[in-house]
């Protein structure tokens, strides 16, 4: 599986509110939170665990090589938490998704 791409899930509203001046920054200055990313092979599992039944979500497709932060996770980890912002140059695509009628996600990710 390609390790050059990583995903971040965000609601449509939160994307609109947190994406300003070419930077997506989901937390306020006072938050010590870091952004949660998921590797492609764990995307469905992650979506169904954290976002079951949700609609109006975006998958941010992020180029690991363009991030202004360094990822330090082991390849076996499915979730990576890093940094507090993503510069828009690192976001290759923003894909809108909804859960299925059963509340679950079943996306097919192909690596080239």
Image (cartoon, helix red, strand yellow):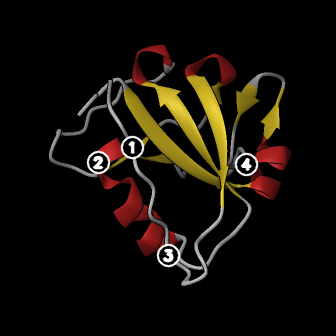
Q: Which residue is mark 2?
A: 41
Tell me how far mark 2 sits from mark 4, CA to CA.
30 Å
Residue 99 position by quadrant: bottom right
Q: Decide which of tag 3 and tag 4 comes sooner along the chain.
A: 4
Closest to the observer, 48 or 28: 48
Tell me how far mark 3 sits from mark 4, CA to CA.
30 Å
Q: Which mark is residue 104?
A: 3
Location of residue 30 in the rendering, given as x and y in whole percent from the top left corner: 68, 50
Q: Vertical placement of 92 versus 26: above or below? A: above
Please tell me how crowded label 2 is: few (under 14), some (14-19), or many (20+) other residues with Cα within 10 Å: some
Closest to the observer, 11 or 111: 111
Q: Cβ–Cβ below 8 Å for labels 1 and 3?
A: no
Tell me how far mark 3 sits from mark 2, CA to CA.
16 Å
Please tell me how crowded label 1 is: few (under 14), some (14-19), or many (20+) other residues with Cα within 10 Å: few
Q: Which residue is mark 4?
A: 28
Tell me how far mark 1 sits from mark 3, CA to CA.
16 Å
Q: Identify the secondary structure beneath mark 2.
A: helix
Q: Residue at x 84, y 46 (%)?
A: 16
Q: Residue at x 35, y 65 (%)?
A: 45
Q: Is residue 39 visible?
A: no
């Amino acid at each position: 599986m390609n390790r050059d791409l990583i995903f971040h899930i965000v609601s449509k509203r939160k994307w609109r509110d947190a994406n300003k001046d070419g930077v997506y920054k989901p937390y306020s200055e006072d938050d010590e939170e870091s952004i949660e990313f998921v590797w492609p092979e764990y995307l469905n599992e992650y979506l169904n665990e954290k976002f079951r039944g949700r609609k109006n979500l975006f998958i941010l497709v992020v180029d690991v090589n363009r991030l202004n932060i360094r990822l330090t996770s082991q390849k076996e980890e499915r979730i990576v938490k890093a940094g507090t912002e993503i510069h828009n140059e690192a976001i290759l695509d923003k894909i809108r998704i909804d859960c299925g009628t059963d509340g679950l996600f079943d996306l097919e990710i192909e690596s080239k």
